Image: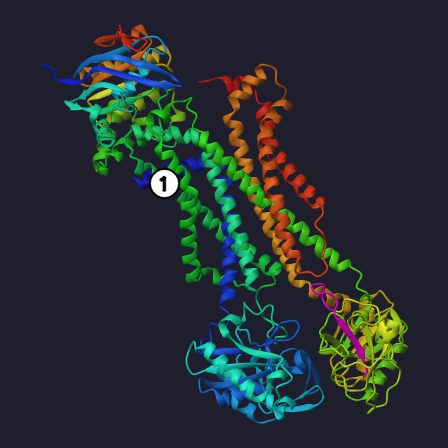
Amino acid sequence: MIRSYIKIAWRSLKTNRLFSIVNILGLSIGLATTLVLFLFILHERSFDSMYANKDKIYRVLLNTTEDDLETWTGSPSAVALELEANIPDIAEAGRLLKHDFGGTAFIKAGNEVFTEKKLFWSDAAILDMFDVEIVKGEGSEVLNTPNTVLLSESAAKRYFGNENPIGKTLTIDDVDVVEVKGVFKDFPENSSLDFNVVAPFLMQNAAKNPTWDNASFETFLLFNTASPNVANVEAKIQDILDKNVKKDEQWYNFSLQPLEQIHLYSSTYKDSYIERNGDINQIRNLTALAILILVIACINYMNLITARSQKRATDVGINKTLGASVRDIVVRFYIETGLITAIAMVLGGVLAVVALPMFNDIAGKELDISSLFSIEIIVFLVLIWFVTSLISGSYPALYLSRFSPKEALKPSANKGGIASVIRKGLVVVQFSASVVLIIGVIVIHQQLEYIQNKSLGYNPENVMAISTSAIRGGQANQALINAFKKLPNVSVVGRSQGYPGMGVSGRSINKPNTDETMGISTNNSEREVADVLQLKLLAGQLLPKNKQAGDTLVEVVVNKTTVDFLGLSPEEAIGKKVAMQLGNNAYIHGVVEDFNFASLHNPIGAYAFHNSSREPKSYLLIRFTNEVLSETISNFENTFKNIAPNSAFEYTFLDKNLELLYEKEQRTANVGLLFSILAVIVACMGLFGLAAFMAEQRHKEIGIRKVFGASVPRIVQLLSIDFMRLVLISLAISFPLAFYVMNQWLQDFAYRITISWTVFAIAGALALVITFVTVGYQAVRAAVANPIKSLRTE
Amino acid sequence: MKNTLLSLNEATRTVNSGSNKVTLLDNINLNVEEGEFISLMGPSGSGKSTLLNCIGMLDNFTDGGYTFLGEPVHSMKEKNRSKLYKEYIGFVFQAYHLIDELTVYENIETPLLYKNVKSSERKAMVADMLDRFNIVGKKDLFPVQLSGGQQQLVGIARALIGQPKLILADEPTGNLNSKQSEEIMELFAQLNKEGVTIIQATHSESNAAYGSRIINLLDGKIV
């Protein structure tokens, strides 16, 4: 029996080629998308699951309790020590600091200098709790002695080639000389932690004098038991905090984050050293999109089946008179659907393999094809196959099987009644979804365009920032500045702690005679930096040219937002003393116009350039005039190498760096675009098939109309108008929906476009044109056909 | 002495068309003996097809009694009724109604599948039928590859494969030319001789003449 059903289904597929291709291709695109996304989600969810202690490891989070309530991933350096000593549930605690608070290290091995972005200063406990596997030399215990270092296998290879690295020395930033004691296995690709070089945390100042102030150290705890009572431990931590910091001086409290949540639930936390962060929202959005595409593909199947219900109903009638029961018919339709989805599944798998590299490229991931053949994926496939077959097959199976044979065999019976209403409803759903996606893509694109072209209040073009953290001493730095100044295409050069688009030091400023405070970004820099950035001076002067070492007088150049907060005009502010954690001797020396020093997600905050030497000036900012970049770069590199042969040449262009701030949005836009195109293609395929069957169904009517004098355009109009009407309904549904959704998305930006009516006009026109082209082809074909043929009954 | 196959007692079929009640069959009284070959005649709309459908249990009388092999069909449940027609009745249609996706062989085999006949038995029965109708050479062809007459031949073979007592044929030659018609009617006559009861609806006097008895219908009544 079942063999006979499969036979019928297979032959029916072969006879109705158009129907089959549309269905199978549509479904396989839907399935391929779902598959790739499932792979992606599996990978994201697998983070940190390989650690034996995964249920016992927690990270300490710091929640600020003043002005903006933020969550930081760093804690003060005393936290780990106090917690380990006073809470018996905790077996071990360890601190982690990325070199230079998140910077790049310059490592000299032999005569070569390397840039190293993954140098961490760590307590031995961290390596223990994450069971880091040592492949050569000594293990984590070496971190209990200063001037030692552990390397990853790939780092060892990079620094020493095939030589044995054990016992060799490295020089970090021309300061610390360390000896290689051991080599560990590279961290797996789905580990949140990823070290190349690990040096002892105890060499850091923060380890020598543990404090409750500077919250820059990621602190990990290993509990004795899995899933400890978090609330209980957090209460104990609060007690410890109360003992060490006076209540009115506490500007934060602590909470615990389990290891399994670190990857997906940390995207809004500040300043983590972990760079492989995912985002649960992204996963949710992509899941929704994948389901949407799959649903659209299933809708195609149902639509095309119902469109052919005339033929189907006759089949049902014949089979029933031959003795088939309702159950037989139901089974038959599910088998037919199951066969089609199975074929689509195989094709979808192939498509997924082909499309994976493209997806990796667009989404910035490194998913592996071999993981497509895992047990999870196979179970998932079977599940999806089952669900898709069930959804797609239900309409024909449950509706058509109820026809009594007499009704079903009556040639004139109107079996399209409910079917055509459902069909129209489904087309509307499909098109509404597609139009929402089209509008989404346009709005995202416009917003990114807007951001990239917005006047920032400074000029990021033709500015290079060179990292000089490995150059020690004022003389060497002055020599470097002089050398650059001599270059013909360099206009201004200045040293600075950081540059716009990168985080600098966060402090707070106090409004005199009140207890109002505001966060302020402070940047230790030279006078020339304002000129490099082409800032507009509103009042006063730029920072003074020379400052004696040891002078406690601090001059500050603030932005307009700062003086607004202080309630002063730029002119009034000049010479005023400011309390902004730069000592008791800080005065406003000048005021500059506001500029967007961070990403446009945030409104402009307070910003200050100062000349207190509390932070190192690690960057040389250069404004150049030449447009020929490759020449400029090699020219700059030679100049740099002449002065600082022991440092690697690390640079960035300010405008390029800005683009990175919107990388996430750019990826969202790209992935969104990809999905939208797929959804629209699948929906169009459905429409195309549907139009073909409609034309076939009405071929007799068309023949009669032609005999009575209808012109070809009239017939085309007749056939298209129904679809056009459906598309118009879809537009009416999707416009408000898209407007709402995209407005929500735009709320993430402090600077955003308003969605204009043209977006809707474009999306609407696009939908109508696509419909007309898709349906029109079928309509024209039907309209130009010879009516004699369609009117011949036998 | 022949057995009564079925009997209709004041059987009536009405439908509601809008607010009007339309009587399609009006107090039909009819006895059919086993081995009869009945031709239903009458103009379009006289109720021939409705009567066939009701006798074939694809449709129901709305009033009156219907007894088939001594069993009261009018008071039966749908399930038992379908069991009854599966077992004893074969249908032949004007438009053949072969399944397009199945070959001649498979089309004939289908009713056996629904009766859960064993595979080896099916093979033997279908082979017999192909042989009897002289269509062994066409067994792997699909309906579209056959002429109308050949399709109807397959249709009849399919109706016969379940060894029914009664064959209901609604205008079996309506779509055929005169030569094909003649062949089909000869076949019916032959089957009737072999003991199969046949009721056919037809427009054609010459086709009706093959039957052992003619019943004329007009406006739902036997005249």
Q: Nearer the viewer, residue A234 or B203?
A: A234
At 34% from the left and 24% from the top, the residue drawn is: A406
Residue A601 among those drawn in magenta: yes
Identify the residue shown where x is 54% and y is 42%. A429
Q: Which residue is drawn at the image coordinates 23% and 13% (left, top)?
A: B189
Out of A763 and A733, give the one closest to the viewer.
Answer: A733
Q: Do we see residue A490 in this rendering?
A: no
Q: Quadrant of the N terminus of chain A?
A: top left
Name the side, left or right, on which A482 lies relative to A283.
right
Q: Residue at x 56, y 85 (%)?
A: A241
Residue A196 magenta: no
**Image height of A756 relative to B205, above or below:** below
Q: Which SS does the magenta portion mostly show?
A: loop
B135 left or right, relative to A608: left
Question: Toward which corner of the image does residue B5 lie, by quadrant?
Answer: top left
Extent of the magenta region? A598-611
- Residue A211 in percent (x, y) is at 62, 88
**Mark 1 lies on residue:** A6
Q: Quadrant of the C terminus of chain A?
A: top left
Tell me where residue A709 appears, x and y as whole percent.
Answer: 61, 15
Disc count in the image? 1
Nearest the viewer among A665 and A682 is A665
Residue reaching furthest left?
Answer: B1
